[in-house]
Image (cartoon, grey):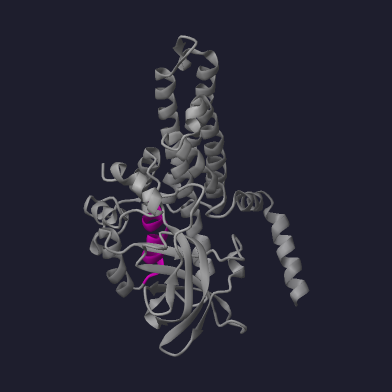
Amino acid sequence: MEAKPHHHEWEKNRMVDKNVWNKAGKMGFLCLDVPEEYGGAGLDFTYNAIISELISKSGYTGLGFSLHSDIVVPYFIHYGTEEQKKKYLPKMVSGEWIACIGMTEPNTGSDLQAIKTNAVDKGDYYLLNGSKTFITNGYLSDFALVACKTNAGTEKEGISLLIVENSEGYSKGKPFEKLGLKANDTCELFFEDVKVPKENLLGEEGKGFIYMMKELPRERLSVAINAIGACEGAIEDTVKYTQERTAFKKPIAAFQNTQFKMAEQAAQLQVHQVYVDRCIELLCENKLTAEQASIAKLTCTEMHSKLVDECLQLFGGYGFIWEYPIARNYADSRVARIYAGTNEIMKILISRGLFKDLYLQMKKMRAKQKA
């Protein structure tokens, strides 16, 4: 009820009311796996997954809780100093501070190693310059976890992660007017001679790419979970609508075509749900691999797009009207095949698992050529 009355207004504003974050924090919906000593509930990822699935099922996609809780928080838990954990985690749990993560740049997309944003060591601080784009929660965020190049042009060149708070030289573009996810603020971030204190380096210098590769499976699983929830919502909405709407003097649901179409969608959802549930178990056991997470992200997002398209067809002309949730669901589904690494990238990652020996030989050949 905190979201439903305001969702249309949020879509117009291209962002939610920041107060909803504070309310979510008070209700215990944020950062459930943060340890108790930092204000969290100390639960495992299963509970995060339940919250994400239910929010996606509801259709209120402006709530960027999943990125905040499921994607940014693990970096602090796994690589943050004790001081960083004490400073940031309690405020993330309460919703007082909203987090975003800056990976993608205008000319890099899924190629994280090609990022241009750089930080120059100035002694007791880094001087940060560059930009990021397509940043979820970017406009409302109180700080960003930014991937940037450090020691550029030297043997020590690598990617590092900096915690960048709202400060001089750090600016944000207006939220994009998007095809879908209209209530979720997504914008560009700009860094012009931003002074970032050395204590805001997350983990070790030059190890940011390794950290991202370790955390991306969880992000991709989160995308799959959101797809599952959205599919559940689409099926429920369609079953209800087709029983209420009549054609040729009987409910649309009475036609065999409708029954067969919905049977197919329900079967697909259940099959994918079982696999995602298994991936959640593996993540909680620290056993989820990049290939398994990529399979979840690839197949669930592809299913979501096909399933919601079939459901929308059963709404007829009303499926094309924005006030109907199925129309929003249809528009929202498209980006899931793009963000968190495009589905083409997912196929590459899956194939690497299948052809390990081949990729190892190619890696050795490249090393010899460089030598």
Residue 338 in sight: yes
Q: Is residue 325 left or right of residue 364?
A: left
> Residue placed farthest to the left in the image?
26
Question: x and y percent of residue 66 in the render?
Answer: 39, 52
Closest to the observer, 277 or 172: 172
**Which residue is pictured at 41% across the width and 18% down the height?**
243
Question: Which span of residues is magenta-colored?
Answer: 66-80
Most prominent secondary structure in the magenta stretch? helix
**Which residue is pictured at 27% across the width and 70% down the height?**
86
Closest to the observer, 193 or 265: 193
- Marks counted in the figure total 0
User: Is residue 22 covered in magenta?
Assistant: no
Question: x and y percent of residue 131 in the render?
Answer: 52, 71
**Which residue is pictured at 50% across the width and 38% down the height?**
330
Question: x and y percent of residue 348 in the render?
Answer: 65, 52
Question: x and y percent of residue 206 in the render?
Answer: 52, 76
